[in-house]
Amino acid sequence: MELAEEQIKSIAEDLETGFKVYLNIETKEIKSIIDFDNDVYADTELWEEDLKEIEENYDKYLEFEKMDSRESFQVMAEFVATVNDEELRKKLELGLSLSKPFRNFKDIIDGEVEYREKWFAFKNAENIGFVKEQLDRYNKNLRGST
């Protein structure tokens, strides 16, 4: 199954912002639904129709996963390795080695305008790659079962 680059980008962005993303494998329609596991106060009524459709036709949907914390940490570490500013790189390395590495990384990178933009571009590219990997796995499984 092939998706347009814009669809892949949209899936990656929705995953990053806390949605669960489902792709109808027949129509290629994307359904992004709030992740109720992470937002217990979300109003399920807004999502009822889509939830029912997915539940009743689950075999027609591919669910995309967001990166887990280990994978997200690895992306941060890979970004740090690209930082040319030695002082900043050392601060980021230290931040990742202490407790609350995600908070530390965010606090440090938020104060660095140039590298903050580079970080967002890097993270976005990694998220897009992660979505493409899932799509590739689905396609390989599909070919393997035919």
Image (tube, rainbow, N blue to C red):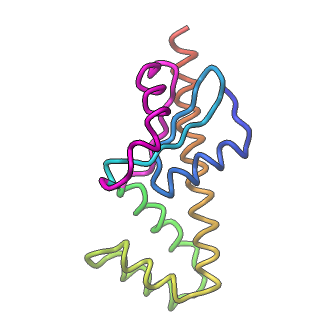
Kindly identify the residue that appears in the image at 29 percent across and 75 percent down. Answer: 100
Q: Identify the residue at the far bottom of this view.
A: 87
Query: What is the total number of numbered labels drawn onto the structure image?
Result: 0
Question: Residue 132 location, x and y as percent?
Answer: 60, 41
Query: Looking at the image, is 130 positioned above or below residue 39?
Result: above
Kindly identify the residue that appears in the image at 53 percent across and 37 percent down. Answer: 134
Question: Residue 8 location, x and y as percent?
Answer: 65, 44
Q: Identify the residue at the far front of this view.
A: 45
Question: Residue 96 location, x and y as percent?
Answer: 36, 75
Query: Which quadrant of the rendered structure holds the N terminus?
Result: top right
Query: Looking at the image, is 39 positioned above or below residue 107?
Result: above
Kindly identify the residue that appears in the image at 61 percent across and 86 percent down. Answer: 113
Query: Which quadrant of the rendered structure holds the C terminus?
Result: top right
Quarter of the image for residue 51 reads top left
Residue 58 magenta: yes
Residue 5 magenta: no
The answer to whether residue 27 is left or right of residue 123 is: right
Nearer to the camera, 5 or 43: 43
Question: Residue 19 location, x and y as percent?
Answer: 47, 49
Q: Which residues are magenta?
A: 40-68
Quarter of the image for residue 55 reads top left
Nearer to the camera, 72 or 61: 61
Q: Identify the residue at the far left of this view.
A: 99
The answer to whether residue 94 is left or right of residue 80 is: left
